[in-house]
Amino acid sequence: MAALAPPVAAVRTAVRQALRGVGGPVLVACSGGADSLALAAATAFVAPRAGLSAGLVTVDHGLQSGSAERAAAVASWAESAGLSPVEVATVVVSREGSPEAAAREARYQALIAAATRLGASAVLLGHTRDDQAETVLLALARGSGPRGMAGMPRRRDVEGVALLRPLLDVSRDETRKACAALSLNPWDDPHNTDPAYARARVRSSALPALVEALGAGVVDNLARTARLLAADAAALDAIAAAALERARRPEDALDVTELQRLPDAVRTRVLHAWARERGAPPAALSHRHVAALDALVMAWRGQGPVHLPGGLPVARRGTLLS
């Protein structure tokens, strides 16, 4: 028996670890690129041996010529690999705002909808260690703070579906080598090298420049930074959640006196979470909005209400924020 190629073993091990504790069917999100194709092949091997059924969803964004044919080819391969059920989800990408963000939003909505319809408990996503390093750099450039620099979580639960990222400790080079070892032919998305997209510029220019200047270990170090900040953020979020409950008052108000006792990092998290509860769209809720709310708490001089995204006014009346 031929020895298992180390990259194939690395991807399978990552999938095996991610599936521990998963109690139901899973789906793989697969574009046909090297990362998600290696993930799908590993899941087809690992899931049945873990007592789980595994299917696949490939999303056709309709943004490139031939996208429907590529999605159909991915689906055909998945069926031949033993994955079931297999679906092609065709989406319409909004032309408002960032095309990257719009495509991502449409993709995740389609994946969650497919998982819900098919009864899957989890969707596996093919983001690698390199993707995580890029995310940290983008967050740093945008001034996103610790929450943004914590990068992509290994698990995020959305509408009862777990979004899992098994490959955050696996390099992009390893997924390519795994595909080669398994005689798989991945598709290279031209958007990944299109300088019109910020992530493509980071991938092709910024991160390679850092590697050249600081050594190959910079990718691991950026990904490690994300892990450390994610742990810190989770601890602070738990403290903030408890503080929010202590500060609650009737009619969805907050007690300013309680808020003033909190450290800055906890208080701003409380205000952010409270604003989201009131209906402020998370994607539109920025540092500027939270800072304005914080000024009502810590630097109130009789100023008027803060207007949150979604047309939601928040005013201070005495010792209450409402």
Image: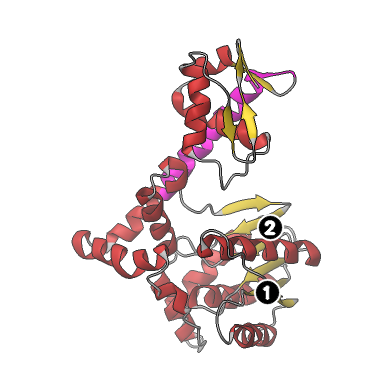
- Image quadrant for the C terminus? top right
Q: Which residue carries the number 1 mark?
A: 56
Quadrant in which residue 77 is drawn = bottom right
The verdict on residue 243 being magenta is yes
**Image location of residue 193, percent across then percent down:** 39, 75
**Image location of residue 129, percent across then percent down:** 42, 62
Number of the label disc, if any, that sits on residue 22: 2
Q: Secondary structure at mark 1?
A: strand
Where 5 sits versus 272, above or below?
below
Where 232 sits versus 57, above or below?
above
Q: Which residue type does callout 1 highlight?
A: Leu
Number of the label disc, if any, that sits on residue 33: none
Q: Secondary structure at mark 2?
A: loop
**Image location of residue 80, percent across then percent down:** 67, 88
Where 273 sits versus 176, above or below?
above
Where 222 sits versus 208, above or below?
above
In front of the other: label 2 or label 1?
Answer: 1
The stretch in magenta equals 226-250
Residue 296 is left or right of residue 196, and the answer is right
Q: Residue at x 73, y 52 (%)?
A: 160
- Say which of 83 and 310 sits in front: 310
Q: Tell me the distance, in whole angstroms, between the alpha carbons under discs 2 and 1.
A: 16 Å
Q: Which residue type does callout 2 highlight?
A: Val
Instruction: Say if mark 2 contacts mark 1, CB within 8 Å.
Output: no
- Say which of 101 and 8 sits in front: 101
Q: Is residue 223 visible?
A: no
